[in-house]
Structure formats: C-alpha cells, structure tokens
Amino acid sequence: MTHATILLPGLEERLYERRGALIRTFEGGEGPPLLLVHGFGGAAWNFSELAPRLHGRRLIIPDLPGHGASSPLPAPTLTGFADVLAEILDKPVDVLGHSMGGVVALRLAERHPSLVRRLVLAAAAGISSSTRIAELTIALTGIVQPGRIAGRRVGRVARSRRLRKFVFGGFEVANPDLLTERAVHGFLRGPTMHTDALGAGLALVADDPRRDLDRVRCPALILWGARDKQVPLEDGFEYARRLGAPLRVIADCGHLLIGERPDVCARAVLEFTDSR
C-alpha cells in the first residue's frame, strides 16, 4: 500500500490533461460532491485528516498545478488554476478552499458560478497576501521551500514531538501536539514533489480577489483559526463583511486548521453544506 493510499484511504487517484498541464486528483465516496482545494505549497494530502470525516460526500481533491504530482501551467495564475478545476468538474459542487485554495475557490465561484453551490473559505489568503511584505515572504518561501526540506525527514518529524514543534509550532499551528502522524505526513509529503511552488506564490501575491467579490453569488461560510499567524483573523472579518457571510472562529487554532482541528472543520462544513 502506497503512502498516497494511506493518506487518503478510499479515494481513487485520477489524472487529467487540462490546459497544458497534467492534473492529479483523488476522488471517491457517495453523496453531494465536495471539492477540496489546498493552499500554497500544499497538496491534496493536506486533507488527510479532514477527508475521512466528511461523511456522505463524494470528494474531489486535486493537486493544484505545480503542486504534488500535478505539472505546472505554462503561465500560472490563480484564475488559470480555477479554470483548470472547472474543466475537471462534471456537475455543480460545494467547495472548500484553504489558504491560497480559498482564492482559487473564489475565482472558481466568480468565473464559473453555475459550478459552485456553496463556498467555504478556510483561512483564505488574498487580502494580507497582496501586500509587499507578503510578496517578499512568499517569494522567499517559494525559493527556499522549507516544506521540501522538512519533507525529506517526514518520518522523523511525525514521530518526534520536538521536531513537530520546530516545524509547525508558532507560525503554522497553535498546538503542534494536536497534529497526528498522518496529518504531518499529509502536510510534508507534497512539497517534496512540487515543480512550481514559486510560480504559484507569485500568482498568489498578484491576485487581490476583493475587487471581484461582488460577483460571487453563492452562499459562503468563513472558517478561521483564532490564533492564525499567517493570515490574520481580521482578513476573515473582511471576507465575512464583503460576502455577507457568517464567520466561525475556532478557538486556540492556527493556520493549518484542516489538520489541527479537522473535527470542528468537518462539522462546520457538513452543517453548512447540508443547509437549505
């Protein structure tokens, strides 16, 4: 059994050729379709703890272009990422986007409104990430790729409380002890395969979705960690205000809420997407 199967059990690996890129997804389950979109430097495996808790849903979890096993787009933009996702969908879906994936999800809802029923933004980037300081930080991250370095020692990190705190503590999560070994593998295995993290990072800092939020017509839920040090809670309030959406804040939780508190995230997503 491969680590791909272990990290997303019950889901089938599929490949699509779209817009000059080969896109890998993991798909499976029965029920209303739910698309999960990971963040900058992530991969489908980021949802290794959340996916098993999303009962009664047909899950579609892609590696974004240049991430995981998906090849890069010739000219990466977040609108391009959204258009690629639109081309692998065969019916309307609910969408959860985490971090940069939140911006991709917003672009998908804006550009392809018939495909998005409901939208969950989990610690979505797009506001603070469009500042000059964020541009420098994201560009440096794309060049250095610390996740790739940690990913080469993922087994040791997953087993060591000290190493988990060193890699994830402070900036990524509020409490590294809440990360399971599977969550650590889910966050760190993808970066070892990335082919264009820098291109995605530059696309992120160039994209400010606020100018187009009035074109997002579907119901939305904003989900945030109260102690997020990457994307401040103030951004969550701004998204909630501009979209007319409820904001749910998870206490004592950081940026990687989908792995740190997957139980709370799953309940929020299922309650919201089940609503009429």
Image (cartoon, rainbow, N blue to C red):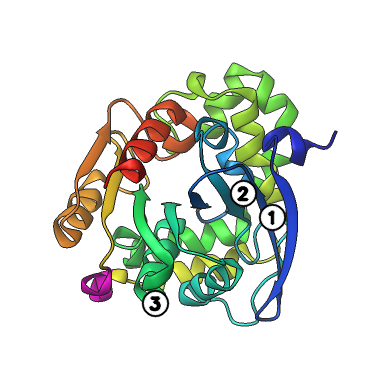
Look at mark 1 in the image and give the residue it sits on: 68
Relative height, residue 89 to residue 122 (above, below): below
Neighbour tally class for label 2: few under 14, some 14-19, many 20 plus, Cα within 10 Å: many
The amino acid marked with disc number 1 is Gly
Identify the image quadrant of residue 109.
bottom left
Tell me the residue at 65%/59% (across/down): 67
Which type of secondary structure does the marked residue at label 2 adopt? helix
Look at mark 2 in the image and give the residue it sits on: 44
In the displayed structure image, the side of residue 274 where residue 248 appears, left or right:
left
Tell me the residue at 34%/73% (across/down): 110
Residue range of the region highlighted in magenta in the rendering:
210-216
In the displayed structure image, the side of residue 84 where residue 98 appears, left or right:
left
Estimate the x, y position of residue 54 in percent, counting from the top left.
Answer: 50, 35
The answer to whether residue 212 is magenta is: yes
Which type of secondary structure does the marked residue at label 3 adopt? helix
| Viewer-side label of 2, 3 | 3
Look at mark 3 in the image and give the residue it sits on: 111
Neighbour tally class for label 1: few under 14, some 14-19, many 20 plus, Cα within 10 Å: many
